[in-house]
Amino acid sequence: MIWLTIAAMALLVFASRYVFLEPKLPLRLTAQTQKLLSYSSPAVLTAIWAPIVFLPEGELMLSYKNPYLIAALFAILLAWRTKNVLLTAVLSMALFFIIS
């Protein structure tokens, strides 16, 4: 049953991607739909990182003792100044491991 579920999920994911990527299919998204979909990646990423940064122990922690918050603020500042993804990721992780 588990293998059937995995195969069904894989088929579902493949089909949902194929519909949008196959150029021969007559499916075209409106400009409004394309603009709406452009917000999905930042929304999903925010849903992942926000609880980790602001609720590290299950409670709201907005103090300087929160290493997640300090490293996140450092990453934001570094990304804004350098515009280098790799440098930002490496240095902010290094800061996090130093202060935690």
Image (cartoon, rainbow, N blue to C red):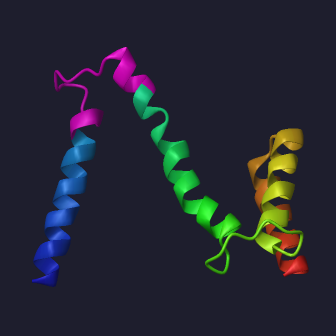
Tell me residue 18's x, y (percent): 23, 42
84 magenta-colored: no
- In the foreground, 25 or 29: 29
Q: Position of residue 17 (x, y in %)?
A: 27, 44
Most extreme residue toward the front is 59
Image point (51%, 46%), residue name: 43
Q: Is residue 38 left or right of residue 51?
A: left
Q: Does 74 appear above or below 40?
A: below
Residues in magenta, as a range: 19-35
Residue 33 covered by magenta stretch: yes
The residue lying at 90 percent from left, 78 percent from top is 99
**Residue 84 placement, left or right of 5:** right
Residue displayed at 89% across by 69% down: 64
- Is residue 32 shown left or right of residue 83? left
Q: Who's the residue at 39% across and 25% down the image?
A: 34
**Residue at the farthest top position:** 31
Which quadrant of the structure image shows residue 59? bottom right
- The quadrant of the picture occupied by the N terminus is bottom left
Along the line of sight, the residue nearer the viewer: 53 or 15: 53
Q: Quadrant of residue 70?
A: bottom right
Q: Is residue 73 above or below residue 22?
A: below
Residue 69: % across, % down:
79, 64
- The answer to whether residue 2 is seen in the rendering is yes
Q: How many marks?
A: 0
Q: Is residue 78 rendered to the left or right of residue 51?
A: right
- Give the image location of residue 82, x and y in percent: 87, 42
Quadrant the C terminus occupies: bottom right
- Residue 90 visible, this orientation: no
